Amino acid sequence: MSISDYHKKHLGRSEEETDRRILVKELELKKILSETNYKPGFKVVRVAVLGCADKRFVKRHKAIFEKLFQKPVEQITFDITTEHLDGEENVVQHDITTPIPNAPFDITFGHVVLKFIEPSKQWGAIKSAYDALRSPGLGIFVYDMEDITTETPIQADGYFSVPMDIYKLKLAQESMKYKDLKWDISLDNVPIPIRGLKGGALVLEK
């Protein structure tokens, strides 16, 4: 299978833009860990990355988690297609709306991934991310603000909206602990120019 136009777009981005996006992810994860006071309970932290748009992110995701936890990290990256990640280690082709293999994990991490999943299957991804955790564990779904505030099924960029209120109700009904974090992070004195971050994350706690 050939690489999609979407993934070609990512591969065509500059190293500076890739650095910027990685820095954003690190800042968001710092915010999440600060808000949850999460500490992994095992010597080696097992991380499942749910979707990855750029092969340059694979090693750098692992580096972020090792930096934040100050522990060795065993990471597996899952994506429904993997041609764009060719050559990277521990990449598994898998539909994340179905049970995640190689569980349990301490962290399941999807960065702006729900918008790429049709709404009828988004809950499957959320539930699979939770079920794959061991305790203590975090299931993280970062989103852009427009993902959850767009009232039409399809957003302006052509991807799906994320009906967060529905999922929060389902989480409560199933007694699954969670936090819905919001942020508007001001970025001053950073080495790479970045606009302020407006978004948030659905964080599942086990």
Image: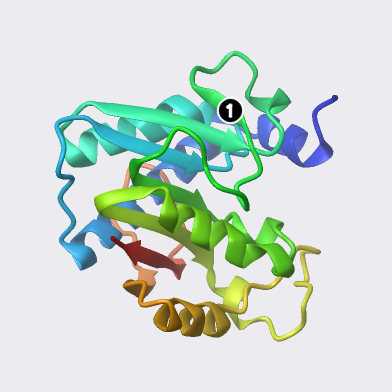
Relative image position of residue 129 (x, y in whole percent)? 47, 53
Q: Is residue 145 above or below residue 127?
A: below
**Neighbours of disc 1 within 10 Å: few (<14), some (14-19), many (20+):** some
Q: Is residue 48 left or right of residue 159?
A: left
Q: Residue at x 49, y 17 (%)?
A: 89
Q: Is residue 30 left or right of residue 115?
A: left
Q: Residue at x 54, y 18 (%)?
A: 88
Residue designated by label 1: 92
Which quarter of the image is occupied by the N terminus?
A: top right
Relative image position of residue 127 (x, y in whole percent)? 50, 61
Q: Is residue 55 visible?
A: no
The residue closer to the viewer here, 61 or 163, is 163
Q: Is residue 77 above or below residue 110?
A: above
The residue closer to the viewer here, 111 or 196, is 111
Question: How many numbered marks are there?
Answer: 1
Q: Quadrant of residue 186?
A: bottom left
Relative image position of residue 182 (x, y in whole percent)? 39, 75
Relative image position of residue 156 (x, y in whole percent)? 78, 71
Q: Is residue 95 visible?
A: yes
Give, as a three-letter code, the residue at label 1: Val
Label 1: element kind: strand
Q: Is residue 15 left or right of residue 94?
A: left
Q: Residue at x 41, y 35 (%)?
A: 61
Q: Residue at x 73, y 36 (%)?
A: 7
